[in-house]
Amino acid sequence: MGLSAFFGFEKKELGIEDYIDQVRPMGLKAEVINAYDKIIDIRMKKANFNMGKSLYNGSKFQSIYENC
């Protein structure tokens, strides 16, 4: 995800050079882009983990409820 989704273009469709060239005029440098993407990746992993955890807890609760 990261800046590509935020600015409405995909990194996969463009080469990384095109990606940086499109973002650089907006005042962001490559280091900032990389750092931002890493933060977004970490947040997404954390969100996916929490979502998985809540789904697991929900299914565990459901099975306890059904067994009563």
Image (tube, rainbow, N blue to C red):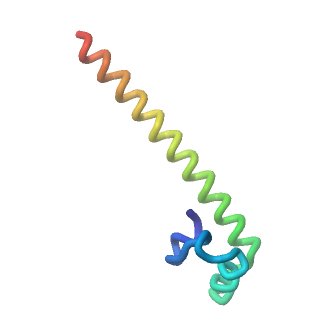
Q: Tell me the residue at 64%/82% (across/down).
A: 23
Residue 1 falls in which quadrant of the image?
bottom right
Residue 62 position (above or below residue 10)? above
Rendered view: 65 above or below 8:
above
Residue 67, image x, y percentages: 26, 11
Q: Quadrant where the C terminus lies?
A: top left
Q: Residue furthest top?
A: 68
Left or right placement of residue 12 versus residue 60 in this view: right
Horizontal placement of 45 versus 58: left or right? right
**Rendered view: 41 above or below 20:** above
Q: Which residue is depicted at the point 37% across and 22% down?
A: 60
Residue drawn at (61%, 71%), measured in percent from left and top?
11
Q: Position of residue 33 (x, y in %)?
A: 68, 71
Where residue 16 appears, x then y in whole percent? 70, 74
* Residue 49 versus residue 68 in the image, above or below: below
Near-viewer residue (22 or 47): 22
Instruction: Name the residue located 63 percent from the left edge and 77 percent from the top edge.
Output: 14
Question: Could you say which is closer to the camera, residue 34 or residue 9?
Answer: 9
